Image (cartoon, rainbow, N blue to C red):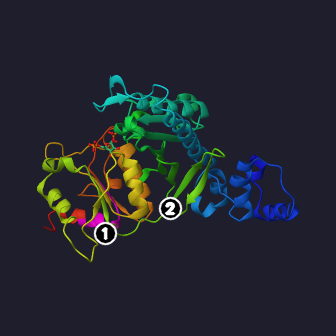
Amino acid sequence: MGRLWQTSSADCRLLHRRNKGRSLSLPASFKTVILIPIIMGQFPLTLSSFITQKPAAHQGVTGELAALLSQIGLVGKLISQDLRRAGLIDILGTTGEINVQGETVKKLDEIANETFLKVFHQNGLACALASEEMEKPVLLPENWPQAKYMLLFDPLDGSSNTDCNMPLGAIFSVVTSGHSDRMPTTDDLIRKGTEQVAAGYLLYGSSTMLVYTVGRGVHGFTLDPGIGEYVLSHEQIRIPTRGKVYGVNEGNYHKWPGEMQKYIDSLKVKDTATGRPYSVRYSGCLVADVHRILLGGGIYLYPGEIEKPEGKLRLLYEANPLAMVVEQAGGKASTGAMRILDVEAKQLHQRVPLIIGSAEDVRDAEEFIQGRRV
Ligand code: FDP
């Protein structure tokens, strides 16, 4: 099968001509998944073939970075397999532990974290790993200096959705170690969003998707379970400049500053020019909510609160990678006061307010939050 994926479209046409009129003794699934797209001229582009066949979209991407992205894909395959059977194999519920964020650890949080660690221990592609689930990063001196990349991730985003079969995700950010003369330390992982070399997410929804950017646009791949490969389904995603949807946990309304309340109130007022009132869509999974907005436009907010101005979401492995993806698709990501990617990172598990989505919607929100609009 590996060879067949490398077949050029000319080869495919030849294959089709040769077999015209003859019935192929191949399983039905093989014909549907592989031959029909070939014959119809829609040869599916897998993740690895996309990276090699679209050099313009991947300029500066080294072989190791391409391999790293495909290993994130492997993590996605392994975790989605667990998620599909989660209700049957006693991996739902909590472990009884509390993580570094003060949150209850779900069994699936632990499994997802372990999966990232095992895959990246084994492949030797990263010299440091940091995760939402671990107070301190895992440094891998055995991989250094060959591996220059460091990976930061939220292994299972939207954990409150685990027990009710709702969407989940994982978010990742890739930075280079920055020093060729010494092994990186924890401090080397604490970097500004603008220093990311790649970022993206896995979405476990009705299908599993890998969406990433290496700083030259955003591409989305859907896992085809029939062939176990990620196939290009969304090339060069562009976010609409304005949407009709907002996503926010409105149960927190009375905890927000007045300016934030006014912005959310404004979204409910009829206005034909901007398409208001907007609809609310909030799943409790940041990846799923941002993915919807990336494709259809609109705004996602997890704002700061009067008692907790830093908000809930983490800068290094949630806000920064999603900000890079959304900006690369033509959108904006802001704290309300400044661009997310310019926020000075001071701590590994630093929190930050996040307002992300269509450029015009984020601009409106900033104007309200900064008191320039009432
Ligand atoms: P969770 O803690 O459940 O893993 O990562 C934080 C996050 O999920 C986001 O995925 C989600 O959007 C948000 O928290 C949900 O928080 P609220 O329950 O406070 O709305």
Magenta part of the protein: which range?
A: 355-364
On screen, residue 124 versus residue 154, left or right, reads right
Pinpoint residue 221: horizontal percent, then vertical percent: 56, 53
Most extreme residue toward the top is 96
Q: Residue at x 49, y 63 (%)?
A: 237
Can you tell which of label 2 and label 1 is closer to the viewer? Answer: 1
Assess disc 2: are there few (<14), some (14-19) or many (≥20) residues with their C-alpha within 10 Å of its C-alpha: many
Judge: label 1 CB < 8 Å from ligand 1: no
Residue type, mark 1 in image: Glu
Asked if residue 211 lies in the magenta stretch, the reply is no
* Magenta stretch, overall SS: helix
Question: Within the displayed image, which quadrant is ligand 1 positioned in?
Answer: top left
Q: Residue at x 57, y 36 (%)?
A: 145
Q: Is residue 127 above or below residue 215?
A: above
Which residue is more in the foreground, 110 or 332?
110
Q: Is residue 93 above or below residue 335?
A: above
Q: Residue at x 38, y 38 (%)?
A: 164
Label 1 sits on residue: 360
Cβ atoms at labels 2 and 1 below 8 Å apart? no
Q: Which mark is residue 12?
A: none
Q: Secondary structure at mark 1?
A: helix
Label 2 sits on residue: 217
